[in-house]
Image (spheres, coloured by chain):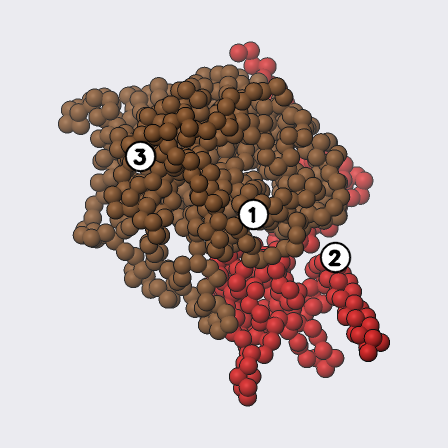
Chain colours: A red, B brown
Amino acid sequence: MDGKGIIRSLGVALKHFVDSYVVDIQARLSGRKRYYTPEGIKERSSADMRGIVTIQYPEEKLPVPEEFRYIPFLLYEEGEDGKQELRCTSCGICAKVCPPQCIWIQRTTDPNTGRPVPAPAAFYIDVDICMNCGFCAEYCPFDAIKMDHDYEIASYDRSKEHIFDLNRLAKPVSYYAEIRPTNYAREEAARQAELEAKAARKAGAASAR
Amino acid sequence: MEQTIVSNSEDLAARFPQMVTADTRAGYEGYIVQPEHLVKFTKKLRDELGYDYLSSLTGVDYIEEGKFEIVYHLAKTTGGPGVVFKVKIPRDKPEVASITPIYRAAEFQEREVYDLFGVRFKNHPDLRRILTWEGFEGYPLRKDWKEPYYEEDAKPFKSRWPNGQVVRSEDNNPYNDNVQYPDGFDPEEWTYTGDELIYQALRRKHGLDSDMDTDQMIINLGPQHPSTHGVFRMVTLLEGETIIDLKPVFGYLHRNHEKIGERNTWLQNMPFTDRLDYISSMSNNFGYALAVEKLMGIKPPERAEYIRVMMAELTRIVSHLISIGFLGNDVGVFFTQVLYCLEERELILDIFEAVSGSRMMCNYFRFGGVARDLPEGVLDKVKDLVFNRLPRKIDDLDRYVTNNEIFKFRAQGVGVLTAEQAIQNGASGPILRASGVPYDLRRAAPYSIYDRFEFDVCTQEHGDTYDRYLVRLDEIRQSLRILQQVVRDIPDGPVQAGKPAYQVKVPPGEAYGRVEGPKGELGYYVVSQGKPNPYRYHVRAPSFINLTSLSDMCKGEKVADAVVILGSIDIVLGEVDR
């Protein structure tokens, strides 16, 4: 019990304290902006961060990584005349795989034949129940449902605004390409390859005939 | 490793022919014990064959046979495979002998089976409800029990597709209308008497008459007390400031995880496991994936194994950092220590987020692999952390805490648990190792690819709070050592065996998958009947069973030390209450 340990502890704490000033002063002298700039945020969240590391939300926001997942959304292709075509075929896999069962889908039926049409008549997600697991996006065979990056969805009325319908869920493919560029590029390449393979098969079948 | 394991392959059915028969059902293993021989047989296993550690005890309701099955998993703290045996008891007269006198680790687990299945254990010292409350109707894990929001026996529900009419379940089940009470139970009239029972039990155990004026008094710490790390209660019997006895009370966060798990499909359980010990979701995923893979008979590809170990070890570091940090809060270093630890944790969570999409609820493991490969740049980040930053910061933390006289004063010799007690109470993880028992599943019964890495099993001798802290600090260093080997050796290749499927086929049978989680031995007991849903899904939660030791640790200590001791056990209520 000679107090050396305590002094050493205080030394560590003092170093942290002094660092919080030194790092800021160093940044200012070298002309780096440590606060309220993207580079500053990057510096403060990098593996050699020192000094003050907290992010001043909401003035500053930590950029989310590409795989970040929050509430799902539905993708639509933008036609030339502004027509929005949902990729969803209402196959129901997302509703079946959903662990808390927060997805409700109504399939369209053809009024003349009574047969199902591959498009949803209604699509609801109760975001109070959604646990953001990402299974719907992972197992969708049509890349029609994806996880969003927009985490600021607070609202004043839980009972009215927390069931998202088609209107609220649908977002353009271009938005998806913007938030998840790598995934988008990979999926597009796969889709292209499949199309080509299909064409080749068709050509092969035609020449055999 | 030179180690001879004595007669693990020995046929117990041949050795004890009158007591046991082999379990010959397809996909099952182990033995069936006659109920009347249970105690004798268990004693023999412990005293003659060296199975000194009760890993898990749970029940299964085979409603079609009209039987309950109590399932016991025993292990040896010297390592090697464990043994499993079952007792079948009739559903209409559910009674079986308690093995708590033989393994105290059974105390809470038998209470849990009593609470959730309604099985009575004869000779149990304190058979009370443990997770549900007095006004709870029925036994929720029985197959014929239905919850208030019941829709169907198993997911996916038919109401969702193809004609999904959205309805909020709270509108469907108006308030007050969805609760069932036992016969003659009126919540308006009811006055709570459960506490009195605990108080009397405590007093009587120490020969104190409740009518007599004594110096002893009963103090409740919690359920809402800043030191209890969640909604958790310690009922203490005090003499002055000294704790004579203590009983933990919990279940405030009970949501019947296991029943939810039995309604879910196999895959749907994966994100639910995240919510058990929410500090270390990757480890929870790991245990569950192992158990189901055992049933399915598949193995993940090499790269996936490396990624799994990487994530599990990063999780261990996260969990231990939290534990060490908040221990600081418990001894009175308000938030300095914990914030230093959280800073490092944030960097690891960044990696989890980049890999899995979420900082805490990772949901990253799949049967036969992991959800996706490491995105670009993540491996470099991990390298930077494990070779450069973390070793330096852990040394900093070491300098800050280990030799600090105030911390030593509060922690050394406080909350001592001897090795015998620890084994007897079924303690696991850092608690067991701090008491001097070198039992670490990564070595004792290696799973995944842990047999390839060089690392030490960290132990200490005294079993006090200080040693538990030291073991955790050492384990962070050993985890870094494993991580350094992982990032050096990780091969390229696929990360998923076979095609990803949302409906997996799991052949009938049972499996017990266990991993060395940060808190201790995390086990999953699953039973499949070949359906899309598990027939039984049980979690052997380390924090829950580690709490058995709390009263042993606290006896004779001061009441202020109970706070520190609880901190040193490192519980997470999401896992304790399930």
Please say whether residue B481 is visible from this viewpoint. yes
Q: Amino acid at mark 3?
A: Pro
Q: Quadrant of residue B413?
A: top left
Cα separation, mark 2 vs mark 3, equals 60 Å
Horizontal side of residue B260 vs A112, given as left or right: left
Where's residue B479, x and y in %?
A: 63, 30
Q: Which mark is residue A182?
A: 2
Residue at figure coordinates x 47%, y 45% from the top left = B26
Q: Residue furthest right?
A: A207
Mark 1, residue position: B296
Q: Residues within 10 Å of mark 1 (few under 14, many from 20)?
A: some
Q: Which mark is residue B457?
A: none
Q: Are marks 2 and 3 in contact (CB under 8 Å)?
A: no
Instruction: Give the mark nearer the N terminus: 3 vs 1.
Output: 3
Disc 3 and disc 1 on one polypeptide chain: yes
Number of numbered discs visible in the structure rendering: 3
Give A13 or B103, whichever is nearer the viewer.
Answer: B103
Where's residue B477, x and y in %?
A: 64, 27
Up/down of B170 relative to B377, above or below: below
Q: Amino acid at mark 2?
A: Thr
Which element carries disc 3, helix, strand or loop? helix
The quadrant of the rendering that contains the C terminus of chain B is top left
Residue at figure coordinates x 18%, y 28% from the top left = B210
Report the mark closest to the observer, 2 or 3.
3
Please say whether residue B141 is visible from this viewpoint. no
Where's residue B234, x and y in %?
A: 35, 32
Mark 3, residue position: B35
Residue at figure coordinates x 38%, y 27% from the top left = B16
